[in-house]
Image: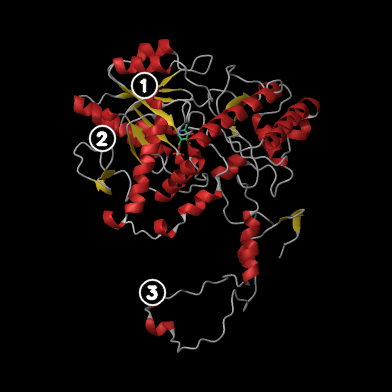
Amino acid sequence: MMSSQAQKGLVFKEEEIFGRGSQGRTGYSLPAFGCPTMDPRKLLSDDSLRIELEGFPRLSEPEVIRHYTRISQWNFSVDTNFYPLGSCTMKYNPKVNEAIARFTGFTNLHPLASDDHAQGTLGLIYDLGLWLCEITGLAAATLQPAAGAHGELTGLMMIRAALQMRGNARSTVLLPDSSHGTNPASVIFCGYKPKTLTSNENGMINLNELEEVMDDSVAALMITNPNTLGIFESKMLQIAKLVHDRGGFVYCDGANLSALIGKTKFGDMGIDVAHLNLHKTFSTPHGGGGPGAGPVVVTEDLEPFLPVPVVIKENTSYIRDFARPKSIGRVHSFNGNVGVLIRAASYILTMGAEGLVEATEAAVINANYIRARLIDHYFMPYKGETLHELVISDKWQNEYSVTTFDIAKALIDRGFHPPTIYFPLIAKGALMIEPTETESKETIDEFCDAMIEIAELAKSNPEKLLKSPLNTVRSRLDEAAAARNPNLRCDFCG
Ligand SMILES: *Cc1c(COP(=O)(O)O)cnc(C)c1O
């Protein structure tokens, strides 16, 4: 049954494409060929020929285009509206960086091209490495890792190699309980045991506890700064000294660098290794599993362990150096996800040093503005000022049986993507909001108005929140059943 009527205004229902079309319909028509044709069955063996699929839909071009375009309109993206996922930096990425990444000089380069045929791309990799070192205050970089988690593993492997050379790789890595889930996973992947540190009432590392557990079994402390609560670890120098004095390394998860660029540097905080997520802070759109890049920056001491190849400059040429005996080896094919590196280089160049500092300031001001507008309406488990993101909770709304989940769904009805929910785990019923620097005051005010309206509705008419979302193609789903028993075939639109 055709069901092309609107579901809500101009949001269209859309059924499975297999239910559409009719025999003989075709997607294109061309004039008769002016050259002789041959029956493909005479040219190709049977196993190379496409088998006619039973029930394969026969559709016109506009039917195909409308089908996919309508489905795409059910998606929400940062090009649609505000997308304040905390610990994700869902910022708007300027289209100019996309255009530059598509320059044919970059896109047509064969991955096996020799160094002298790849000077432009190698030069870009070299320069971007220098810029990331300047931004982080560290000495050397690899741009190969394909994601934040991959960067974590690469950094930890370098720490392991360095400790191994000293004679003992040690066994444990310390992590705060607010850390991103990829941190303990990378620790285990690298053959270490994760040991959790309990955050203090300000959401920071407890120095006394660190003092107690930091011994010669500990390879590294893996920290996030600003941490996953959006709070700056102000005791960073003491923390680093403690770890270094007892022979460990300090790893910093720099996935979200929006709060620091141009303000402070990892190198000045006693950090030995860090990864950055170019697909968060440096203008590659993320989410949906597209390619990313998680460059790793290190101190001079760790530089010999960088993965191969390292791009170096000799006179005026860029070459890939493989002759690095202490290297941990390759972590990615070819040169990493180069398209992401090009976007980052383009972003840094178009922003300029001053622009990057302004972006940092705007990201922090935006988060603190939201904090100020919501502080009388939502419980905030950590009292200190925040950097680029903030954590609030549903504690006050729980009195009316309204939960974080209901708040998130109610935001959808008001046109906003919900923030990160129920994370970090140490804040019960958390909503973690990261506005980023790219949002205007008007957008942020609309979001805050919606949040305040929801908080008020929770008091006056909580029932109204329990059925949201109502303005979407599908309303509240049984999410547990959907995750355990996914039905990817469409009875979705029936
Ligand atoms: C996103 C994120 C990661 C993981 O990055 P991926 O690219 O998804 O692997 C790690 N740590 C923090 C703090 C993050 O926000």
Where residue 155 sits: x, y (%)? 33, 33
Label 1 element class? loop
Residue at 40 percent of width and 56 percent of height = 106
Q: Nearer the viewer, residue 291 or 472?
A: 291
Which residue lies under the disc numbered 1? Answer: 270
Q: Is 464 left, or right, of 394 in this rendering?
A: right
Residue lying furthest right in this view? Answer: 460
Position above or below: 313 against 115: above
Distance, label 1 to label 2, CA atoms, is 19 Å
Q: Amino acid at mark 3?
A: Asp
On the rendered structure, is 256 left or right of 488?
A: left
Q: Quadrant of residue 468?
A: top right
Residue 470 image point, x, y percent: 74, 43
The answer to whether residue 112 is seen in the rendering is: no
Q: Residues within 10 Å of mark 2 (few under 14, many from 20)?
A: many
Please identify, in this view, whether the residue under mark 3 or under mark 1 is nearer the observer: 1
